[in-house]
Amino acid sequence: MGRAFQNRKESMAKTAAAKTKVYSKYGREIYVCAKSGGVDPSGNLALRGLIDRAKKDQVPSHVIEKALDKAKGGGGEDFSPTRYEGFGPGNCMVIVDCLTDNPNRTFGDVRACFTKTKSKIGTPGSVSHMFDHCAILAFEGEDEDATLEALMEADVDVTDIENEDGRLTVFAPHTEYAKAKQALTDAFGEIDFEVDEIQFVPQTTTPIEGDDVALFEKFLDLLNDLDDVQNVYHNAELES
């Protein structure tokens, strides 16, 4: 599981520079999370994790505050989550998570990204069954037994714990995110999580080679340029 997760992190890093709209994407996600779960990060663990992640990605405080203020007002846009699945260049599997106020527009935009790169958008569930929808929490530490014990005492359904280079990475079902994070905080105090997110981790990887590498990178760039796209998950493993 960890290897597939790391492959995705490395491939995402290659396209990070293309995410010119990263501030607005974080702002939109914070707004939706705060509107649905409350604007107080101490009572909304998903929001707290999102804000921490935004800060690590150097999103300015005023962007975060503006999103929270908008959520407090109760008005604003009515964004809803939508998810698209399909097969990208080299027949890799792809999941695209969006937040949109116009699903028809977003579907057309995402489908165009598939079409322009000789890819095929699929039906709901066409590839997601080949991914694990995981909460991932990584932090400095080496006591795997104490970590597992804390999670089990809190009745968290732990999928996996990896211990590598002084860092523990906990994998749990996405529905256990808040419970897992609270259990770790209760056991070890305030933790500076290096990874604190929910994502789709592929069960297998698909090698991308030759001309498909450039096509795949173009595919990611097209998707990341769309305002409505929040995250792109895939099982592609690019040749080094």
Image (cartoon, rainbow, N blue to C red):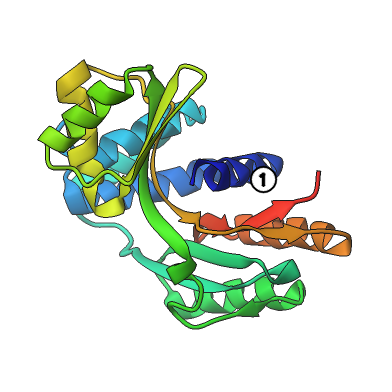
Residue ID for mark 1: 11
Answer above or below: position of 5 versus 192: below
Query: The C terminus is located in which quarter?
Result: top right
Amino acid of disc 1 = Ser
Does residue 184 appear in the picture of this structure? yes
The residue nearer to you, when weighing 194 against 113, is 194
- Image quadrant where residue 69 sits: top left
Q: Residue at x 70, y 76 (%)?
A: 119
Compared across the picture, whether 87 is left or right of 149 comes to right
- Looking at the picture, how far across and down is residue 199, in whole percent? 42, 51
**Which type of secondary structure does the marked residue at label 1 adopt?**
helix
Does residue 61 appear in the picture of this structure? no
Answer above or below: position of 239 versus 138: below
Which residue ends up furthest to the front in the rendered image? Answer: 145
Compared across the picture, whether 95 is left or right of 34 comes to right
Q: Residue at x 43, y 70 (%)?
A: 129
Disc 1 residue crowd, few under 14, some 14–19, many 20+, Cα 10 Å: some
- Image quadrant where residue 61 sits: top left
- Looking at the picture, how far across and down is residue 106, in whole percent? 51, 72
The residue nearer to you, when weighing 152 against 83, is 152
